[in-house]
Image: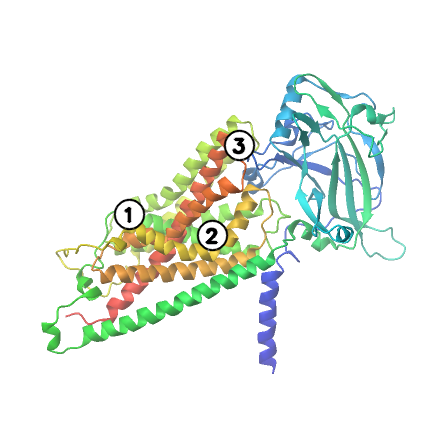
């Protein structure tokens, strides 16, 4: 039937979206067609190292410079990432081979590095720096070949190819430093179909490099800037001695190969994940856990609630003689406004702002609109969305503040607009000062900082005020029971009703649901990998929302049964329990996976981790709070109260 076909098409489309985020992308970049001999510009992005986490710009090291250095105008995301895209003196033409050519402007005079420069290069080699270049917007990659099977006879057959982003600046052997001074570029082109009599056009579809270290004497250079590469066996590497001046030549060669890869899928080699199975496995695992949880939850809660409500609503005389117990007892206090209602509503407003931003960003990225080829698009989008989502944040915060009997709405709006962003800006500013001190390109330049401040006070603040004004004027949430004049006595609580125990118990399920994805996100941030599995991330986000809400409802039910009615702040804190596990995981990741030793990189790592944990706590806390609030209003509306 046509209806079935329609349904099938939807299912297929969904599967395609979840799986095929890398197979097409909508806006961003149009392909560039080259004819033979057209120049293909090679630009440098930055130097990075996962050991120091400090990016540097390309010309911070004494590489060969073109006659005129021009920097590309950059978007917000690129600046925040530390990219400084700049031209280089490499002369590469489409489909034209180069055997070996000297890079710097004088044909066969070697470059002399001063002691200072030699020291700097040796330092960067020791810190494991990688150089990132791009040709036609494609980042350079180094091919790594692994023998997957260890058996000798199998070795010839199975080679696993993986790509490393960028190429290593050099390598160490014992206590000696060697610089990769010869680059063999291997570029792959795809021949486009054209009419018969037109000259063929090509598109760049892959950019690889084989870095080599070749001693000055072995690179025989002549007056025409040509050089000859020695035979592979007999050549000695180019040593950089940090204690004296060094002489060397920077050289490069270009080799073109035809490829069947279409332009649209040229990013696949950078993004191929060998472990998509892990993601599916973890998602199925999480879904099972969540279903299991919701099953138990609905059974317990619905059965107990039905029983409770039936008991409470029986108008028998026996009722008077029986002592009331459980959650009905606190009906006169359950909606008593908490302490610091302004701060609570401000944090929840920021949580809503974050929630909307993350949801939209992940959804748009899942549709393939923020692919890695448009550099920095993700960061830029996230920043702007956070500013614009201020309306929703303000609206929810204002309405809640009104419900909690607050009346200073202007102060509340200011608090919502500045509390969380202020903390983020403060931490980032302090970290930025340290990065500035290191002269790294990861430091946000002053004009960008001013621009961000202007966005915060020019876009976000007015929007929060606008939302807050309407939220505050709207009818407050209606609470189904009246609050008593005199607060009840709270009985002695059992040990497991402690806040911290609650945090530990509530955090473990949502964290378990997104644990695998967290590993990939961490390696994307700290180890210069690409992260693009937004389809999976979207699923994980939904699972996270569901599990947070469920846990939060269970916790609030137990708390009210123990006749403790101070649930507002507690729910917010306890629902964000998974943030605590994220913090522990970040520490584990730091110790086990990263080899960061110096003080400033460690400070950066923990500074940014603190921001992530804080944002995550706000996000999960907000989800849990609203779930619990709806639940509490539902159950008290169901019982008859005299």
177 with respect to 489 (left or right) = right
- Residue position for label 1: 342
- Residue position for label 2: 357
503 or 479, nearer to the observer? 503
Q: CA distance from mark 2 to mark 3?
A: 25 Å
N-term-proximal mark, 2 vs 3 = 2
Q: CA distance from mark 1 to mark 3?
A: 35 Å
Q: Which mark is residue 469?
A: none
Judged from the image, the secondary structure of the residue bearing numbered disc 1 is helix
Q: Position of residue 555 (x, y in %)?
A: 31, 59
Circles 1 and 2, Cβ within 8 Å, touching? The answer is: no
Q: How is the image coloured?
A: rainbow
497 with respect to 111 (left or right) = left
Residue reaching furthest front?
152
Q: Quadrant of residue 182?
A: top right
Judged from the image, the secondary structure of the residue bearing numbered disc 3 is loop
Q: Where is the N terminus found, in terms of image quarters?
A: bottom right
Q: Position of residue 479 (x, y in %)?
A: 24, 63
Categorize mark 1 by other alpha carbons within 10 Å: few (<14), some (14-19), many (20+).
many
Answer above or below: position of 623 versus 347: below
Q: Where is the C terminus found, in terms of image quarters?
A: bottom left
């Amino acid at each position: 039937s046509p209806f079935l076909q329609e349904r099938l098409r939807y299912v297929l489309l969904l599967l395609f979206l979840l799986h095929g985020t890398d197979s097409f992308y909508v806006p961003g970049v149009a392909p560039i067609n080259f004819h033979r001999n057209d120049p293909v510009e090679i630009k440098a992005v930055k130097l990075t190292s996962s050991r120091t986490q400090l990016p540097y710009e390309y010309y911070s090291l004494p590489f060969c410079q073109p006659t005129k250095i021009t920097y590309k105008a950059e978007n917000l995301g690129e600046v925040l990432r530390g990219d400084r895209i700049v031209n280089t003196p490499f002369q590469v033409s489409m489909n034209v081979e180069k055997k070996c050519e000297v890079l710097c402007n004088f044909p066969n005079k070697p470059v002399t590095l001063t002691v200072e420069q030699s020291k700097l290069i040796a330092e960067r080699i020791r810190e494991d720096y990688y150089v990132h270049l791009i040709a036609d917007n494609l980042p350079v990659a180094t091919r790594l070949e692994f023998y997957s099977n260890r058996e000798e006879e199998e070795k010839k057959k199975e080679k696993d190819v993986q790509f490393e982003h960028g190429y290593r600046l050099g390598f160490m052997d014992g206590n000696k430093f060697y610089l990769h001074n010869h680059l063999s570029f291997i570029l792959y082109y795809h021949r486009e179909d054209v009419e018969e009599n037109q000259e063929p056009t090509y598109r760049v579809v892959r950019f690889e490099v084989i870095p080599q270290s070749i001693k000055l004497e072995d690179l025989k250079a002549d007056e025409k800037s040509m050089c000859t590469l020695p035979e592979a066996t007999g050549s000695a590497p180019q040593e950089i001695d940090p204690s004296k001046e060094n002489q060397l030549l920077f050289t490069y060669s270009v080799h073109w190969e035809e490829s069947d890869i279409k332009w649209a899928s040229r990013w696949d080699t950078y993004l191929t994940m060998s472990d998509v199975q892990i993601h599916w496995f973890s998602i199925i695992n999480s879904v099972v856990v969540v279903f299991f949880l919701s099953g138990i939850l609905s059974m317990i809660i619905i059965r107990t609630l039905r029983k409770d409500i039936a008991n409470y609503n029986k108008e028998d005389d026996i009722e008077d003689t029986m002592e009331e117990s459980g959650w009905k007892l606190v009906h006169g206090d359950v909606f008593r406004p908490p302490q610091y209602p302004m701060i609570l509503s401000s944090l929840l407003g920021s949580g809503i702002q974050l929630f909307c931003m993350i949801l939209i960003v992940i959804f748009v990225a899942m549709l393939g609109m923020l692919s890695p080829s448009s550099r920095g698009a993700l960061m830029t989008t996230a920043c702007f969305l956070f500013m614009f989502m201020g309306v929703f944040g303000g609206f929810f915060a204002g309405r809640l503040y009104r419900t909690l009997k607050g009346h200073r709405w202007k102060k509340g709006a200011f608090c919502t607009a500045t509390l969380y962003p202020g903390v983020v800006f403060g931490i980032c500013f302090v970290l930025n000062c340290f990065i500035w001190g290191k002269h790294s390109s990861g430091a946000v330049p002053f004009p960008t900082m001013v621009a961000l401040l202007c966005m915060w006070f020019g876009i976000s603040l007015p929007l929060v005020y606008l939302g807050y004004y309407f939220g505050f004027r709207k009818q407050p949430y209606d609470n189904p029971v009246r609050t008593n004049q005199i607060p009840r006595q709270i009985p002695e609580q059992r040990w497991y009703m402690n806040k911290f125990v609650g945090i530990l118990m509530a955090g473990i399920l949502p964290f378990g649901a997104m644990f695998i994805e967290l590993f990939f996100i961490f390696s994307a941030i700290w180890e210069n990998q690409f992260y693009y599995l937004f389809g999976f991330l979207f699923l994980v986000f939904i699972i996270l929302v569901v599990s947070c809400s469920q846990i939060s409802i269970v916790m609030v039910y137990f708390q009210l049964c123990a006749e403790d009615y101070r649930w507002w702040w507690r729910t917010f804190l306890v629902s964000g329990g998974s943030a605590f596990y994220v913090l522990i995981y970040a520490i584990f990741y730091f110790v086990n996976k990263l080899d960061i030793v110096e003080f400033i990189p460690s400070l950066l790592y923990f500074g940014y981790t603190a921001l992530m944990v804080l944002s995550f706590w706000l996000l999960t806390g907000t989800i849990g709070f609203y779930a619990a609030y709806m639940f509490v209003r539902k159950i008290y509306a169901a019982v008859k109260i005299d």
